[in-house]
Image (tube, rainbow, N blue to C red):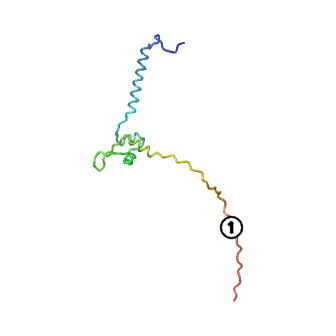
Amino acid sequence: MNALPTTDSPLGDTSIAALLEQFRDQLVAELRAENQRPAWTDAAGVARHLDCDVEWVLDNKQMLGGVPMGDGPKPRYRFEIAAVDEAMRARRPQPKAPRKASSRRRTTKSQPAPRTIRPARAVLPIAA
């Protein structure tokens, strides 16, 4: 039994080659579109990119490199996606350095010594 297609197959050799070429072209187009992000976007675009709320983006606009579009009291902001990604990488917590072994001996916390009960003083009668 031959697993390779032959000219006897319903599709034929030329049809399979055409389908493979079409599939390749579609795959290349999708990969290119995925890699072509807009250079600048608004707060909603950043929120979608980071999967967070627009309010968080606007609250952190300086850290994310937001640029105001206008001089009014409430300008709209634009963000460069590459700068947003870099700012988020800078916020990533750094792994802690392993602790060095202490050269001092550890002391175990011992129980405090029990208190001794002092005997009561004898009460002397007052001379009259």
Quadrant of the frame with the N terminus: top right
The residue under the point 30% across, 47% down is: 75
Residue 67 % position (x, y):
33, 45
Name the residue nearer the viewer: 56 or 109: 109
| Tag 1 residue | 115
- Kindly give the residue lying farthest to the top in the view shown: 8
Residue 34 % position (x, y):
40, 32
**Residue 57 as seen in the image, left or right of residue 117:** left
Quadrant of the frame with the C terminus: bottom right
Mark 1 Cα within 10 Å, few/some/many (few <14, many 20+)?
few
Residue 21 % position (x, y):
41, 20
Q: Tell me: residue 104, above or below residue 27.
A: below
Residue 99 % position (x, y):
56, 50
Q: Tell me: residue 32, above or below residue 59.
A: above
- Kindly give the residue lying farthest to the front in the view shown: 103
Quarter holding residue 108: bottom right
**Residue 82 as seen in the image, left or right of residue 106:** left
The residue under the point 29% across, 50% down is: 73
Q: Tell me: residue 124, above or below residue 70.
A: below
Q: Amino acid at mark 1?
A: Arg
Quarter holding residue 25: top left
**Residue 111 as seen in the image, left or right of residue 95:** right
The residue under the point 70% across, 75% down is: 120
Label 1: element kind = loop
